[in-house]
Amino acid sequence: MSEKKQSLALLAIFSFAFIAMGVGTITPAIASIAAAFPSVGFSTILLVSTIPSLVSIPVAIIGGSIAGKSVKYRTLVIFATIVFVIGGVVPYFLDNFITILVSRAFFGLGLGLIMPLNTSLIFNLIPPDKQANIMGINGVVMNIGGIVLQLLGGVFASIAWNYSFLAHALGLITLLLVILFLPEPKKHQFPAGAEASQEKLKLPGSIYGWALVFLIVTILDFPSLTNMSFVLQTIGANSSVAGIVLMFMTVGGMLAGTVFGKIYQRMGKQTLNIGFAFFIASQVIFAFSQSVVLFIIGEALMGVGLTLVMTSINMLAGASVHPSQTPMAMSIIVSGMNLGGFLSGYVYAAIMGALGITTLRFQYFCGTAGFIALLIVFLILFTKNKSAPA
């Protein structure tokens, strides 16, 4: 691929990354949506944010199994973008909560394909020696998209709750760039010999382990997204302020993405632990903060942690499989993340209900303890291996 074509391909890949964090677009509007439907319970309201993650799970697995095989990458990427736009915008026109949930489930069809396909395209179109840096830049673009979408979601929600859904229309720009510039990755050839090829097709067990880690991480960090507008209300902040606060998660993620390649080259697997340390700091701040400024700092720290952890897992997993297996590997890992996003609210509701706890800040104490446990586990596992995998 010529340098010009590779640059245009990267533009298309990055535009796809731009909408990858679209699930967070309406998080600043959760409190406004709840106010618009006072007869709907809190856990049911959260389905507006979490049901796309649930639908994404089987979609990601199916997409990963067919991408580059029975269905072209380009076809799946275009389909995912179209569904993202349609499913994302339609709730603006609705006033029935059930039909809104149905449209959010449809939105999940596109969402389930976006992140695994985005990562797989990097592993299949970019030379191995450039992948860490491109993954870092990809994270920057992903977080810029998150900033724009969340900020628009919060600002629009201050007008009316349903306006927040209009921010998804930005996906039309992605659709245009993908159609114009995204090439179809070449099919990879296996070494000669049926046995070698068959062996290559077996996913390592570590992929499922990384999916479990992603599930736990998402359960722990999700309250910092979905419940933030409610917590900020307790200190007098409205939905537009919540949008600004949440935006700084993506600011932190963007900053981390700009230096990820250098950090990963130097620290290798330990980059994951650095990310956990940032997560811990963010949860401590959320648990005790009484000012918007501190919440902003906490969200920025969480964004750094999320980018370092997510991208480290993707790099470690991608290095352990053949390029032709990356769609399936990334789909399994992203499914862990999506399942964690769906389960998070129910896990905390069950724990808080059993203990009779009503303050939402309890979830941040749980997040602190959980991330400390993960840090200890991976410090033990990685202490003797600081180099990045070949």
Image: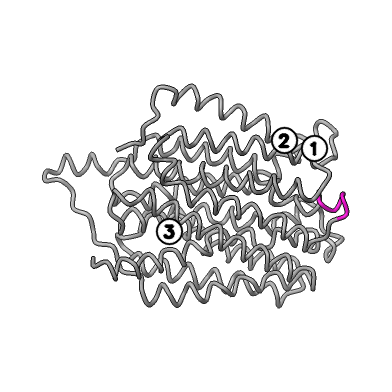
Q: Quadrant of residue 32?
A: bottom right
Rendering colour mode: one colour
Label 2: state its secondary structure: helix
**In which quadrant will I find the N terminus?**
bottom left
Residue 84: give x, y in percent of width and height: 54, 68
336 horizontally vs 221: left or right: left
**Spatial distance from mark 3 to mark 2, Cα to Cα?**
32 Å
Asked whether disc 1 touches disc 2, contact meaning CB atoms under 8 Å apart, the reply is yes
**In which quadrant will I find the C terminus?**
top left
Looking at the rendering, the stretch of residues picked out in magenta corresponds to 232-236
- Label 3 or label 1, whichever comes before in sequence order: 3
Instruction: Name the residue rendered at 33%, 42% in the picture.
Output: 319
- Front residue of 319 and 97: 319
On residue 284, the disc is 2
**Spatial distance from mark 3 to mark 1, Cα to Cα?**
37 Å
Q: Amino acid at mark 3?
A: Asn
The secondary structure that dominates the magenta segment is loop
30 horizontally vs 103: left or right: right
Q: Amino acid at mark 2?
A: Val
Instruction: Name the residue rendered at 75%, 59% in the picture.
Output: 30
On residue 288, the disc is 1
Asked whether disc 3 touches disc 1, contact meaning CB atoms under 8 Å apart, the reply is no
Q: Given this view, does label 3 or label 1 mark the residue nearer the observer?
A: 1
Residue 167: give x, y in percent of width and height: 64, 71
- Front residue of 84 and 231: 231
Instruction: Name the residue rendered at 53%, 35% in the picture.
Output: 274
Residue 18: give x, y in percent of width and height: 51, 64
Q: Residues within 10 Å of mark 2 (few under 14, many from 20)?
A: some
Q: Residues within 10 Å of mark 3 (few under 14, many from 20)?
A: many
Q: Residues within 10 Å of mark 1 (few under 14, many from 20)?
A: few
Relative to 340, say whether 166 is above or below.
Answer: below
Residue 151: give x, y in percent of width and height: 68, 64
